[in-house]
Amino acid sequence: MEEAHRIFKISTLNAAQSGMTAKNVETPVELMPMIRKVEEAIKRRVAIGTKISYPKLQQEMLQRFENAKAIDLAILSMIKRDEFVHLEQRKILHRKR
């Protein structure tokens, strides 16, 4: 039991240090217009209540916008606003609203 707790604590700290929590993501001002465009495209692409593969959504948006950082920041901000929820170990996105 102690070993399981120790491993959990270590993995949680590693995830936090690697940026998985996304609390420290700073958005460059010059990316804001692009991020808004990506968010609008995502809202048109993914209907409320549906699920989509995270890599598939990234790939589709990359073909359209060619700015991976803006795409990732747009998805992340939508998750923070509770418009999307991660499912299945962050492989699937579910659009809530």
Image (cartoon, rainbow, N blue to C red):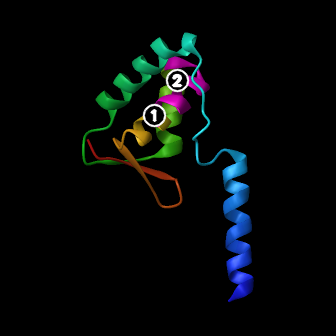
Q: Which of the 4 image quarters holds residue 5?
A: bottom right
Question: Residue visible at 57% across and 23% down?
Answer: 27
Q: Residue at x 45, y 34 (%)?
A: 77
Q: Nearer the viewer, residue 47 or 29?
A: 29
Mark linked to residue 77 = 1
Vertical comparison of 9 with 56: above or below: below
Q: Which residue is mark 2?
A: 63
Residue 42, percent across and down? 37, 30
- Asked which secondary structure carries label 2, the reply is helix
Q: Which quadrant holds the N terminus? A: bottom right
Q: Please give the name of the residue rendered at 37% of the width and 38% of the height, measured from the top-left corner.
A: 81
Element class at badge 1: helix
Question: Could you tell me which residue is drawn at 57 percent across and 41 percent down?
Answer: 23
Residue 58 % position (x, y) = 52, 35
Which label belongs to residue 44? none
- The amino acid marked with disc number 2 is Gln
The tally of labels here is 2
User: Which residues are the magenta region?
Assistant: 65-75
The secondary structure that dominates the magenta segment is helix
Determine whether label 2 and label 1 are within 8 Å by CB. Answer: no
Q: Mark 2 to mark 1: distance in Å?
A: 20 Å
* Residue 95 in the figure: left or right of residue 6: left
Asked if residue 62 is positioned above or below residue 79 in the image, the reply reads above
